[in-house]
């Protein structure tokens, strides 16, 4: 029997594109990753230092005091596992967890955003649901909800400088528990089958398909290769001799904000 280790990120990938998920888990062929904003990583490290400081004091951080009826988990495991089935093991790294007076637990995760979001991204709900299963495996008593803290920059009107604000969201997970279990089973079945077809909504599959189409292009196959040490006709002629029309010009590259106004960090 095949054994699979699945995480919140891999399950979110399965929902996005079964083909990319299959390649990542079965063949260790991962999607290419661009540079991750270092400011998000830096904020994450500082926030964890702050939480550890208050953990040693057996207190909630000031911005959570009075908002959560519990305390920080005394000892936060670095990595947690849950045996979902004989063939599937869930694994995850929790940002934080809350311990309540009745001995139950709830996951808490923090995100860095460019503003206080009005809607909760579905990937975050799945992530919290996975963390709930991990907590249940270890402590056997968990709440049917979790917490998200969003940290985002704001304009300080007094100093006219940047400061970070935060908002706490209580996420009901009751409706997502069964959905998560169905997703895990479907993901495991996917891994036992042949490679899925490319997904129409996956930008990575679309790029791969475009590259394949380009390589099979009759124009490319008929093109005469340039021998080493020689130059093409365009390279040997002065710029004025090379004709261009509007279709030869590169499209204007959108700025980062318009291209990706909101990230998942």
Image (spheres, rainbow, N blue to C red):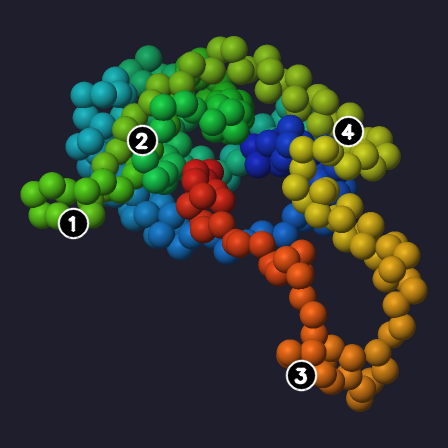
The C terminus lies in which quarter of the figure? top left
Determine crowd level at label 3: few under 14, some 14-19, many 20+ residues with C-alpha closer than 10 A: few
Query: What residue is drawn where x is 71% and y is 21%?
Result: 185
Q: Are marks 2 and 4 in contact (CB under 8 Å)?
A: no
Please identify, in this view, whether the residue under mark 1 or under mark 4 is nearer the observer. 1
* Above or below for 99 versus 261: above
Using the image, tell me which numbered label, if any, was put on residue 238: 3
Determine crowd level at label 2: few under 14, some 14-19, many 20+ residues with C-alpha closer than 10 A: some
Name the residue tied to disc 2. 116
Name the residue tied to disc 1. 161
Q: Secondary structure at mark 1?
A: strand
Query: What residue is drawn where x is 45% and y is 51%?
Result: 255
Depth check: 99 or 213 in front? Answer: 213
The N terminus lies in which quarter of the figure? top right
Looking at the image, tell me whether mark 3 or mark 2 is earlier in sequence order. Answer: 2
Quarter assignment of residue 77: top left
């Amino acid at each position: 029997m095949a054994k699979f280790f699945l995480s919140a990120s891999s399950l979110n990938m399965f929902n996005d594109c079964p083909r990319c998920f299959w390649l990542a888990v079965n063949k260790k062929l991962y999607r290419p990753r661009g540079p991750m904003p270092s400011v998000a990583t830096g904020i994450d490290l500082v926030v964890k230092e702050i939480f550890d400081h208050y953990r040693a004091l057996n207190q909630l951080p000031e911005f959570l005091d009075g908002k959560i009826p519990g305390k920080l988990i005394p000892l936060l495991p670095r990595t947690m596992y849950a045996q979902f089935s004989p063939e599937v093991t869930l694994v995850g790294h929790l940002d934080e967890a809350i311990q309540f007076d009745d001995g139950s637990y709830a996951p808490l995760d923090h995100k860095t955003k460019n503003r206080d979001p009005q809607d909760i991204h579905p990937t975050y709900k799945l992530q919290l649901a996975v963390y709930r299963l991990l907590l249940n495996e270890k402590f056997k008593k968990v709440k049917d909800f979790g917490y998200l803290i969003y940290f985002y920059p704001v304009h300080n009107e007094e100093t006219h400088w940047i400061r970070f604000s935060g908002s706490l969201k209580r996420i009901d997970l009751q409706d997502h528990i069964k959905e998560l279990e169905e997703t895990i089973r479907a993901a495991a079945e996917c891994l036992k089958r042949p490679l899925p077809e490319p997904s129409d909504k996956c930008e990575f599959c679309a790029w791969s398909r475009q590259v394949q189409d380009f390589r099979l292009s009759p124009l490319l196959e008929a093109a005469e290769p340039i021998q080493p040490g020689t130059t093409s006709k365009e390279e040997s002629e002065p710029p004025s001799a090379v004709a261009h029309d509007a279709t030869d010009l590169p499209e204007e590259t959108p700025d980062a904000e318009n291209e990706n106004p909101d990230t998942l960090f």
